[in-house]
Amino acid sequence: MCTSAPPGNRFERRRAATRSALVSAARQILVETGDTGVSIQAVADRADVGFGSFSNHFESKAELFDAAVSQALEEFDQVIDERLRGTDDPAELVAAGFRLTARMADSHPDLMRILRYRGLAQIHSEKGVAPRARRDLERGTATGRFTVGDPAIALSALGGVLLSLVELRFSRPDLHGEEAAASLAEMALCMLGVPDAEAREIARCPLPSGVAD
């Protein structure tokens, strides 16, 4: 989870604790239902803070839920980044990202539920996993690994497929998650211009071990 240096005095620590409680409450709501239509009072009650405290930290519910989603996606990105540190091939990064995401439906279900409910709006965000995915696509395009005309359009396509995989993992738990992820990763690589046989091999090569197992 994202951490920062502790505030320097009691007032700042209390203020930080209140903000953290509100964000945590918003995350719980996103995990449970994905419904952001709850009242500010309901969020404050869940956070166990006073109603008036809300306006000291957020201008609107939308800002609060955006903060909760951003926090969750940054954690998601940290998990993926940690696993793939040292991997340079953009094609391997794309395929492994799909497969690790599928595994995280079991190892980090709360994060994946937030991605399931709110991920579509984050595909072109400047926070969380989107900048890393865009970087990998741009690098793959610049080096000729991928043959796509516009990385932004490719990012839309990849993001949609990835979110479909997350939805599949939750709505069809009877399916073999590993094979479903590998198959979608293979299709994604082919879409990016990787030759069929190579795409199939990359989508099924061993993954580095780590926290998403």
Image (spheres, grey):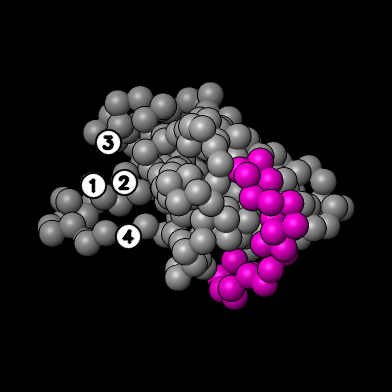
Residue contact between numbered discs 3 and 1, judged by CB atoms under 8 Å: yes
| Kind of element beneath mark 1 | helix
Residue ID at (35%, 49%): 20
Q: Please state which of residues 149 and 87 is positioned toward the viewer in this rendering.
A: 149
Q: Give the range drawn in magenta.
A: 190-213
Which residue carries the number 4 mark?
A: 3
Res. 179 in view: yes
Query: Tag 3 or tag 4, which sits nearer the N-term?
Result: 4
Q: What residue type is labelled 4?
A: Thr
Q: Which quadrant would residue 35 be assigned to in this image?
A: top right
Q: What residue type is labelled 3?
A: His
Which residue carries the number 3 mark?
A: 57
C-alpha span from label 3 to label 2: 8 Å
Q: Please state which of residues 17 and 178 is positioned toward the viewer in this rendering.
A: 178
| Quadrant in which the C terminus is drawn | bottom right
| Kind of element beneath mark 4 | loop
Q: Looking at the image, is mark 2 or mark 4 nearer the viewer?
A: 4
Residue contact between numbered discs 1 and 2, judged by CB atoms under 8 Å: yes
Which residue carries the number 1 mark?
A: 15
Q: Looking at the image, is mark 3 or mark 2 nearer the viewer?
A: 3
Residue ID at (54%, 58%): 93
Residue 170 on image: x %, y %? 74, 46
